């Protein structure tokens, strides 16, 4: 079984790390700024908590990171301490939803030390992280994917190989942008149905077999009806992915008016950032 250093023991990271331990991999973690909730949660399953970066990554065959954003990726990897601690031959599996540019920068930073990187953002949200059935939108060296097969099989049910490093991050952001547009429409549909006084249970059944049915409707319409916005994927995180995709489109000189309007609505929903992304339904009509 593999020696794995894991960074990013948050909402998604903890269940992913637990599944790696259940599969028999050896897990090494380092508390971030003294925060112990995540490390202690995975220690119960046999993970080793270390006090130094060298202890955490020095013997690692793989380093997995699923941290909040570009700044967190930069802070974790682009420094001399990590460059000195990581051993040649290590494979970095970078799973953060961040920009293509930062993951390419990390790959270049470690290239001379013969450290390979797999650009591997994930989709499926918390339920699939718990079940170990995430989808990985991977990019990078096919040989690195082959070496990481047992790692991926512990946390995912499907792994795509999408070409060069950066493509994974870009496609993840693009697909979340597409999902966000649809989610904004589901929220608008919910407000429309509520105003019309329709029976929501029957309406849900009708839409499920109609042209308007979608993954976003299936996942989120009933949350809106129940006014249950406990986060499985926070609204702020979805807006972050939208901004990454729109920045890439802008850099190519593209105009995406539907996407830009949806992004405007998600910015208006900033008061609900810590709630589930389905809270876009609470943005008032005419906002």
Image (tube, grey):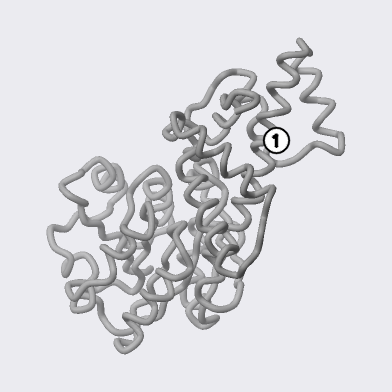
Q: Is residue 249 left or right of residue 234?
A: right
Q: Judge by depth and name the residue closer to the eye, 204 or 45.
A: 204
Label total for image? 1
Q: Is residue 243 left or right of residue 28?
A: right
Q: Is residue 132 left or right of residue 253?
A: left
Q: Judge by depth and name the residue closer to the eye, 242 or 255.
A: 255
Where, by quadrant of the figure, is residue 70 drawn? Answer: bottom left
Q: In the rendered image of this protein, does residue 251 appear above or below residue 7?
A: below
Residue at 52% from the left image edge and 50% from the top image edge: 132
Where, by quadrant of the figure, is residue 266 drawn? Answer: top right
- Measuring from the top left, give residue 96's x and y in whole percent: 43, 58
Residue at 54% from the left image edge and 29% from the top image edge: 279
- Measuring from the top left, give residue 216's x and y in whole percent: 67, 39
Q: Judge by depth and name the residue closer to the eye, 262 or 215.
A: 262
Q: Tell me the quadrant of the picture where the C terminus can be found.
A: top right
Q: Residue furthest top?
A: 197
Q: Residue furthest left?
A: 51
Residue at 75% from the left image edge and 40% from the top image edge: 214
Q: Tell me the quadrant of the picture where the N terminus can be found.
A: bottom left
Residue at 42% from the left image edge and 65% from the top image edge: 94
SS of the residue at dot 1? helix
| Label 1 environment density (alpha carbons within 10 Å; few <14, some 14–19, many ≥20) | some
- Measuring from the top left, give residue 228's x and y in whole percent: 54, 22
Where, by quadrant of the figure, is residue 88 drawn? Answer: bottom left
Residue linked to disc 1: 185
Q: In the rendered image of this protein, does residue 106 appear above or below residue 273?
A: below
- Measuring from the top left, give residue 243's x and y in whole percent: 51, 53
């Amino acid at each position: 079984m593999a020696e794995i250093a894991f960074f990013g023991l948050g909402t998604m990271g903890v269940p992913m790390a637990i599944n790696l331990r259940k599969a028999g991999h050896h897990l090494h973690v380092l508390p971030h700024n003294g925060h112990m909730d995540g490390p202690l949660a995975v220690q119960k399953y046999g993970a080793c908590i270390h006090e130094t970066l060298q202890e955490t990554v020095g013997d690692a065959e793989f380093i997995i990171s699923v941290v909040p954003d570009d700044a967190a990726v930069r802070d974790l990897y682009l420094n001399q301490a990590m460059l000195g601690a990581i051993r040649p031959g290590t494979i970095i599996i970078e799973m953060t939803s961040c920009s293509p540019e930062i993951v390419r920068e990390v790959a270049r930073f470690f290239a001379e030390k013969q450290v390979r990187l797999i650009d591997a953002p994930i989709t499926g949200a918390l339920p699939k992280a718990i079940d170990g059935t995430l989808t990985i939108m991977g990019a990078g060296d096919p040989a690195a994917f082959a070496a990481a097969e047992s790692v991926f099989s512990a946390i995912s049910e499907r792994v795509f190989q999408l070409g060069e490093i950066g493509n994974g991050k870009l496609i993840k952001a693009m697909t979340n942008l597409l999902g966000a547009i649809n989610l904004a429409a589901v929220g608008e549909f919910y407000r429309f149905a509520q105003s019309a006084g329709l029976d929501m249970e029957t309406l849900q059944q009708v839409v499920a077999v109609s042209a308007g049915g979608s993954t976003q409707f299936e996942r989120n319409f009933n949350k809106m009806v129940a006014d249950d916005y406990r986060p499985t994927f926070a609204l702020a995180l979805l807006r972050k992915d939208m901004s990454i995709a729109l920045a890439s489109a802008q850099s190519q000189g593209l105009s995406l008016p539907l996407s830009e309007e949806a992004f405007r609505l998600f910015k208006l929903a900033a008061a609900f950032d810590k709630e589930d992304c389905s809270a876009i339904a609470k943005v008032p009509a005419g906002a």
